[in-house]
Image (cartoon, helix red, strand yellow):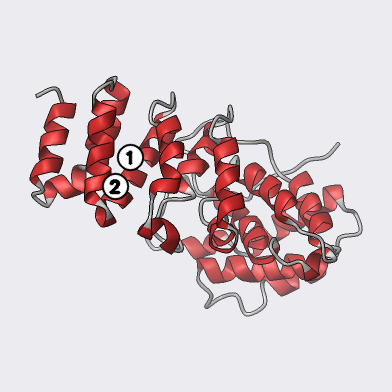
C-alpha cells in the first residue's frame, strides 16, 4: 500500500523560527520517502545529499531551488517522466481553503521544479512540455499554490497560459479557480511582476468577471486583490469595473468591491471612496 506523508510543521509562523527551516533534512527525507513509493529505484541518498548540501545559510526560495535541482539530478529524464513521478507521489488534495498550516510549503520545491524546468525543450527530448507542466500546476495548486510557479509561463508564453486560466476558471476546485485570478495578478506580492498585464490588464478581465460571484470567499478575495492591483496602475479602469459590477451586485460582490478599493480609498481618492460607500449601501 502506498503511503505518502507531509513533514511535521507548525500551524503558523513561529517567532524565532524562519520559514526556511520548513525545507530541512526532515523535508528532504519525506520527499525521498514519497518518491520511493512510486519509483523504488530512486536514489534517495543522493537526492538528500544534493538537496541539503551547504543548505544552512540558504533562504527559503534558495532551498526550494536547490531541492528542485536535486530532483532534476536524481529523477529520470525527460521532464515529462520526472514530473509524472512527482505527481504520483502527492498527498491528497486539500479540502479546506483556510488554516492549512505551514506543512503545505513542503510542495514549494515541486512547484519550483516545474517553474525552472517545465519550459525546457532540451530537457524534454525536444517535445513541448507545456501540457504536462500545466497538469502539474493544476495538481500542485490543489495542495499548495502555483500562483508563483505559473508566472514564468505567463512571461514566456502569455497567450497559452492565459487560455489555460480561461479553461480553469469554472473548475470545481476553488484552489484552481483562485489560481486563475491570483496567478495573473499584475503585482502579486513576493511574485514576479507581469509587465504585459501591468501595461494592459484587460486580458484578465474575463477571468475576474467569471469569478467575482464565486461561492468561495477564498476565490473572491483573490478577485478583489487583483482589482486592487489594477487600481495601482489603471485606477479609472478599476473604478469603472467596480461601478459596473455595483449595478447588479449582491452582498458578496459588494464585499469584493469594498475590498478591492480599500487602498485608493484610504489614499483619499474621492471616486474610490464614493464607490465603497455605495457598495456599503450608504
Element type where label 2 sits in the image: helix
Residue 167 position in % (x across, y down): 60, 37
The one nearer the camera, 105 or 269, is: 269
Q: Quadrant of residue 181?
A: top left
Q: Quadrant of residue 26?
A: bottom right
**Horizontal side, residue 71 vs residue 36: left or right:** left
Question: For the C terminus, which image quadrant?
Answer: top left
Question: For the N terminus, which image quadrant?
Answer: top right
**Horizontal side, residue 177 vs residue 36: left or right:** left
Q: Which residue is mark 2?
A: 228
Residue 52, relative to residue 251: is it above or below?
Answer: below
**Mark 2, other Cα within 10 Å: few <14 / some 14–19 / many ≥20:** many
The reply to whether the C-beta atoms of the residues labelled 2 and 1 are less than 8 Å apart is yes
The one nearer the camera, 225 or 159, is: 159
Residue 215 position in % (x across, y down): 44, 23
- Give how far apart the Cα atoms at labels 2 and 1 are: 6 Å
Res 250 label = none
Residue 42 position in % (x across, y down): 86, 60
The one nearer the camera, 134 or 30, is: 134
Residue 156 position in % (x across, y down): 58, 63
**Horizontal side, residue 97 vs residue 69: left or right:** left
Q: Residue at x 42, y 63 (%)?
A: 195
Residue 62, relative to residue 198: is it above or below?
Answer: below
Give the farthest residue toward the right. Answer: 41
Q: Residue at x 45, y 35 (%)?
A: 98
Q: Which residue is mark 1?
A: 224
**Mark 1, other Cα within 10 Å: few <14 / some 14–19 / many ≥20:** many
Answer whether residue 218 is visible to the viewer in this image: no
Residue 33, relative to residue 47: is it above or below?
Answer: above
Q: Residue at x 36, y 37 (%)?
A: 221
Element type where label 1 sits in the image: helix
Amino acid at each position: 500500500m502506498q503511503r505518502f506523508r507531509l513533514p511535521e510543521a507548525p500551524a503558523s509562523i513561529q517567532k524565532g523560527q524562519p520559514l526556511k527551516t520548513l525545507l530541512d533534512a526532515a523535508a528532504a527525507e519525506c520527499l525521498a520517502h514519497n518518491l520511493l513509493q512510486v519509483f523504488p529505484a530512486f536514489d534517495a541518498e543522493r537526492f538528500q545529499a544534493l538537496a541539503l548540501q551547504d543548505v544552512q545559510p540558504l533562504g527559503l526560495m534558495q532551498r526550494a531551488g536547490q531541492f528542485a535541482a536535486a530532483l532534476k539530478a536524481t529523477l529520470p529524464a525527460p521532464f515529462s517522466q520526472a514530473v509524472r513521478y512527482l505527481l504520483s507521489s502527492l498527498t491528497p488534495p486539500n479540502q479546506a481553503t483556510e488554516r492549512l498550516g505551514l506543512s503545505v510549503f513542503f510542495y514549494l520545491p515541486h512547484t519550483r521544479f516545474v517553474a525552472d524546468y517545465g519550459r525546457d525543450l532540451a530537457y524534454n527530448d525536444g517535445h513541448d512540455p507545456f501540457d504536462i507542466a500545466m497538469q502539474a500546476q493544476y495538481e500542485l495548486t490543489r495542495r499548495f499554490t502555483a500562483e508563483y510557479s505559473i508566472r514564468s509561463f505567463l512571461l514566456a508564453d502569455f497567450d497559452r497560459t492565459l487560455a489555460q486560466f480561461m479553461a480553469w476558471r469554472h473548475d470545481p476546485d476553488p484552489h484552481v479557480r483562485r489560481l486563475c485570478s491570483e496567478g495573473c495578478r499584475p503585482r502579486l506580492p513576493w511574485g514576479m511582476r507581469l509587465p504585459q498585464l501591468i501595461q494592459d490588464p484587460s486580458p484578465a478581465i474575463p477571468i475576474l468577471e467569471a469569478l467575482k460571484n464565486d461561492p468561495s470567499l477564498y476565490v473572491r478575495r483573490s478577485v478583489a486583490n487583483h482589482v486592487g492591483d489594477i487600481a495601482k496602475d489603471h485606477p479609472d479602469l478599476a473604478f469603472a469595473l467596480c461601478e459596473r459590477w455595483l449595478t447588479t451586485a449582491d452582498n458578496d460582490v459588494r464585499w469584493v468591491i469594498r475590498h478591492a478599493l480599500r487602498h485608493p480609498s484610504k489614499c483619499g481618492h474621492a471616486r474610490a471612496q464614493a464607490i465603497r460607500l455605495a457598495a456599503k449601501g450608504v
